[in-house]
Amino acid sequence: MKLTYFRGHVPNFGDELNTFMWPRLLPQGFLDEDDSELFLGIGSILWEHYPKEPRKYVFGSGYGGYAPAPDVHDGMWDVIFVRGPRTAARLDLPLSKGICDSAVLIRKLDLPPAGGDIGIAFMPHYHSFTRGHWPEACAEAGIRLIDPRDDVEEIISKIRGARMLITEAMHGAIVADALRTPWLAVRPIHAQNAAKWSDWAESLELDLSRHPLQPSSLLEAYVSATKGRRYYGGRAKQLGRSTLARPANKVLTLLAARHLRKLSRCEPQLSRDDRINDACERAHQAVEEFLRSRASVMEHRP
């Protein structure tokens, strides 16, 4: 069964969690390169692009609206559970399937120790590094930057050591919540990345508070103003790299730093202990039940 997740041009924490977690949660040798069966794990990866022939097994994945939804009732899907009630409803599944994002199962693992006293940290969305100036803004604000493109274990260690995580990256919040690090959600600069947050939050009965994020560059301001609709055009990227943009970028970076300092004084969030415990146990039970059923089928094969 082949581990299947989104692979971009650069590593991204939420996606790379798959390679960290599932080999530790599943029996040795369970995952292989046999693409006649696909193991769909963490990420907004429920879309119609998969080939019909492989059997697809869904473990906490979500629908993000980036592409048309798949028909999970065509006989080639086994949905163990999905990220939340919105994904369950969109795919016409029982709401009981909307347990939680499977990254909650990080609570079942032996983890790297907390990375010292990190203080207040900020994790941008990984796309924000190509269009913004967040290292400079964080340095100006005196806030620790957590780069979602870094090594997964290093990021986990920093999240565990943070007093509070301000995050544009959804899996920053998901992992922080699972590890009981208080977090503060900011609305993504690219509006298309916002919808999936509610799916996860509702799985934990969490009243999500999302704060505005001040753009750190002229390109981010453009993306925010157009809600991302024109971001991928060449003119927008040229605007961000032009000599004329430099004075505006410097001012916007300083304003972003000032806004980060303001956010650092806001009240962070955490889901209730009973809800995170229940979601983790239900997800773990669903995985264990699947493994037992799978072992029984394999045992009785001729």
Image (cartoon, helix red, strand yellow):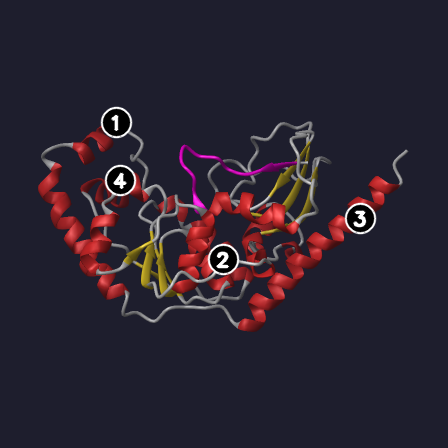
Q: Are marks 2 and 3 in contact (CB under 8 Å)?
A: no
Q: CA distance from mark 2 to mark 3?
A: 32 Å
Q: Looking at the image, which residue is at 40% across and 46% down?
A: 193
Q: Amino acid at mark 1?
A: Gly
Q: Looking at the image, which residue is at 41% across and 59% down?
A: 159
Q: Is residue 161 visible?
A: yes
Residue corresponding to mark 3: 293
Residue corresponding to mark 2: 112
Q: What percent of the width, then of the height, locates residue 237? A: 24, 32
Q: Secondary structure at mark 2?
A: loop
| 67 lies above or below 187 | above
Q: Give the foreground label among 2 and 4.
A: 2
Magenta segment: does it hold 265? no
93 vs 222, left or right, is right
Q: Amino acid at mark 4?
A: Arg
Q: What percent of the width, then of the height, locates residue 167? A: 36, 56
Q: CA distance from mark 2 to mark 4?
A: 31 Å
For residue 131, the mark is: 4
Q: Secondary structure at mark 3?
A: helix
Q: Provide the residue span drawn in magenta.
A: 2-13
